[in-house]
Amino acid sequence: MEHLALSAPRHTTAARAELPTVFDLREAAEVLTDAAAKAGAAIMAHYGTMDSIEYKDDDSPVTKADRDADAILLAALHDFAPSIPVVSEETVTDRKAPLGRLFFLVDPLDGTKEFIKKRTDFTVNVALVEDGFPCFGLVYAPARALLALTIADGVAIEAQMPPNSAGADLNALEHRRLHARAANPDAITALVSLSHLDAKTEDFLKGFAVTERSGAGSSVKFLEIARGNADLYPRLAPTMEWDTAAGQAVLEAAGGHVVDTRGARFRYGKTDAGLKNTNFIAWGRRVLTPR
């Protein structure tokens, strides 16, 4: 582990938009790390309980942990950047309203089903999107005390951070830089969704030499590729934009890729589709084509 100097992220490639000058993204990383520690503590306060489980119109569960974490994150974002719209899974009312070129996407508890089952693969997701692409991302798995976030263009880090209702100081954490690996075409490690594995995904995987496969919930799958532990995560079943933007930002900063089924970089702000994602594939450093 090492201490890395935190600097404001900046994009250097033409494929990515210039970062906003509305605020310092280094400060954003610090503010949101603190908020994530608090949100994680609020979530873990309900871990292993059956507190107030309800079901939304799409039959997905929502708990008091979702709502408590959401309140913490929204308050932090409002205090830090009140002029930037925030789209959160738990509070969005109009999924087709125009968002502009800069907005936050928040999922306060990604993997609620896994949380209810007392698994550890659930996360807090916060992303900043500019001109259709995530330029900042934070993913926090409180049950694993694992934090991952972007700190500069092409730089993502991970750190151990236990949930703490008093917050946390990013600069006091020991960091390790994340590096996605280049897949070996003859030995692919694939990740799949635990809750949404379907025949299309199975058929897709048959096009690759998958020698190891495991299932996981939430944005943990993006993190495992960013950490160099896996190569491929295909998602050919429904997701929403707040499910994926933060994980994409972290994975891309670690050298990985998230593409649509045509091979184009995955985009956000699809209000015409009610913020529903199309199918996508996440890769490490090497994007392969089916055999």
Image (tube, rainbow, N blue to C red):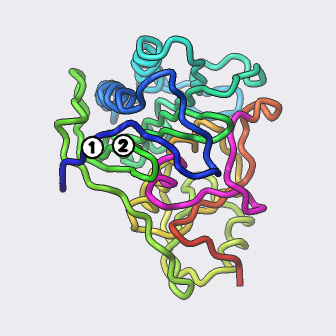
Name which residue type carries label 2: Ala
Name the residue at the right extreme.
272
Q: Residue at x 46, y 62 (%)?
A: 225
Where does the magenta region start and end? 248-269
Q: Which of 196 and 9 is in front in this view?
A: 9
Q: In which quarter of the image is the N terminus?
A: bottom left
Q: In the figure, is residue 130 to the left or right of 123?
A: right
Q: For numbered disc 1, what is the local secondary structure? A: loop
- Disc 2 designates what residue? 141
Tag 1 residue: 145
Whether tag 2 and tag 1 are in contact, CB under 8 A, the answer is yes
Q: Examine the rendering and report whether any part of residue 43 can be seen.
A: no
Q: Which residue type carries mark 1? A: Ala
- Rendered view: 220 above or below 122: below
- Residue lying at 69% horizontally and 44% vertically, measured from the top left: 267
Position of residue 75 relative to residue 11, above or below, is: above
